[in-house]
Image (cartoon, coloured by chain):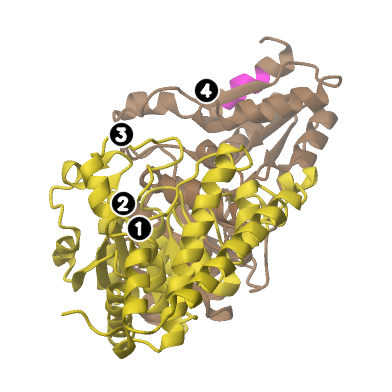
Amino acid sequence: METKLRMVLPDQELMRLYEQMFLSREFEEHCAEQYTKGNITGFLHLYSGQEAVAVGATAGLHKEDYILSAYREHAQAIVRGAEPKRVMAELFGKATGLCKGKGGSMHLFDPSLNFMGGYAIVGGQFPISVGLAFSAKYRNEDRITACFFGDGAVNQGTFHESLNWAQLWELPVLFICENNFYGIGTEVHRSSALASIHRRTCGYDIPSEKVDGMDVIAVYKAVKYAAEKVRETGRPHFIEATTYRFRGHSMSDPGKYRSVAEHELWKSRDPLPSFAKRLLEEGIATQEALDAVEARCKTRVEEAVTFAEESSWPEDNEVYSDIYV
Amino acid sequence: MSEMTYRDALNLALKEEMRRDPSVVVWGEDVALYEGSFKVTRGLLSEFGEERVKDTPISENTIVGVAVGAAMGGLRPVAELMTVNFALLAMDQIVNHMAKIHYMFGGQATVPMTIRMPGGGGSQLGAQHSQSLETFFMHCPGMRVVYPSTPDDAKGLLKSAIRDNNPVIFLEHELLYNSKGEVPEDPEYLVPIGKAAVKRPGEQVTIVAYARMTVLALQAAEELTKEGISCEVVDLRSLAPLDDETILASVKKTGRAVVVEECWRTCGLGAEIASRIFENCFDVLQAPVRRVSGLDVPMPYSRKIEKLCIPQAETIVLAVKDVVSGRY
């Protein structure tokens, strides 16, 4: 039986989760539009469909906790608090972007939010997460490191090296796998000998669990519990959130390798309308309140696009700055 | 000043920096209990304890990556890779992460870390343990590369590397660990990164070298004085950035140059330095720049033919004679 939402979080927090999911979706859909217009170029990997994971997980962490992610990380950054204007400007390559237009879609970073980066080499963020966790432990800081990654990353050597290392050195790392079942176009059972990803951690004696990544409350509860365990024990923990991306791997991928039926099945589990329905049914929100949230998000994203359009390009001399300290 | 080995000078640099700054931590394969495969980390575990001196699994990419994360978190890790050959397993973290993070995050993150790695050949270790990969690192912007030839430079450069806010590749030559020299005792003795040293002044030809090749170049220069040829030996010390000023000033003075590199000749650092000399000193050059290089072959085991693959003092002597006499 489903837990009543109010038993988990206060109304205001529940509404905030919905707003963050809607903002992420709206942001990503505008990114797609700006990509087709040629305002965003390069690689663009969108998050639509996976919102419950970023939103639920981030809500289960403390502000001091470090977050690292991969290249599909716009939502993680925005949900953590990155200003959509500056994220959009980064995607446009403008000087006002989060990383001055030098990072782009796959390299968002904001140390003021302890958002320690999107990394575009599959599995590259695992050891860096372990190192950040070490630095926090070394300084006796009450801070864990949450490392997001996709199902494709678990076949990289760094995954195994870092899980082994985190457990061996007793480091506070929370590994959060977003299993959307596809590494580009290769379905998980075609790339992983053990497709049930959370079971892979038994080789390192790291506790793990699987959670429905289309249910923001389920993700929140699992991450909150796991984060507390990590804090308490100082040891790593692992969560596999099953989810689905509604678009292809990137904007250049029409996603022909997935059947219409499969797509429709997941679409029927879209985390936004299903959560909205629960908010209404349990009397937490009225339709008017949801409409107001949605309108607010739409305005914020439209403002972000305008801001990005109107922002200046980096000066030519920026090409040589920041190579060395 | 006191006389000590290159190994002990490195060890002293580590100890001094760890005493000075609690954010300096050391890890790598067998660096703690075993005290390092080349014993550079001797005594660190007993003085600084298990939190600061740590043995790691044999996971080179992760050794570097954990250091990257720890450096981003405010520590100053000094990671040891057992030999430079194993750095190839860590090239993702070195090239794609360590060297790029400061730039791609718009200057918001710094990665103040050092990777120490023994390198070079000449000990009959075969193709997989005798490589000179310095050029691989020089090619990539975003990190410093240093390679000392003497104990005093080893101490001063390692201390500078640890204090630098940029990532630094710190190469150590396996055949120099037992070499001896005078080393300043001053714990503030630093050798700046990016400054070459004229290790021997001369008039007729500049020999540009680094690490063990500097030792051979000095032997060659000594030999050549007997034949009345005066050589100036420039020790690069830092491979990235290269000290153009010192190299070019020397070549402008002598009008001739021989570049000695232990690495493979093709696309090696000698090609880069020769090119810079041609671009900047063409009007004063009295002879084409000559390269003395490692052979473009995987290193063989047999000592008879291994020797052919690494520049020797005699090959440097021959190259200098050619350049000075006009035979090239």
Q: Residues within 10 Å of mark 2 (few under 14, many from 20)?
A: many
Secondary structure character of the magenta stretch overall: helix
Under circle 2, the secondary element is: helix
Q: Any idea which chain is the yellow one in this picture?
A: A
Which label sits in the foreground, 4 or 1? 1
Chain B colour? Answer: brown
In front of the other: A170 or B7: A170
* Spatial separation of the CA atoms under disc 2 and disc 3: 22 Å
Q: CA distance from mark 2 to mark 4?
A: 36 Å
Q: CA distance from mark 4 to mark 1?
A: 39 Å
Helix, strand or loop at disc 4?
loop
* The residue stretch that appears in magenta: B316-321
Q: Position of residue A128 (x, y in %)?
A: 43, 62
Q: Is residue A95 left or right of residue A56?
A: right
Q: Numbered disc 4: what chain?
A: B
Residue behind mark 4:
B266
Residue B319 belongs to the span the image colors magenta? yes
For the residues tagged 2 and 4, is the chain the same?
Answer: no
Same chain for mark 2 and mark 3? The answer is yes
Q: Which chain does the residue under circle 2 lie in?
A: A
Residue B160 visible in the shown view: no
- Distance between the alpha carbons at the discs numbered 3 and 4: 45 Å
Name which residue lies at 51% across and 58% down.
Answer: A26
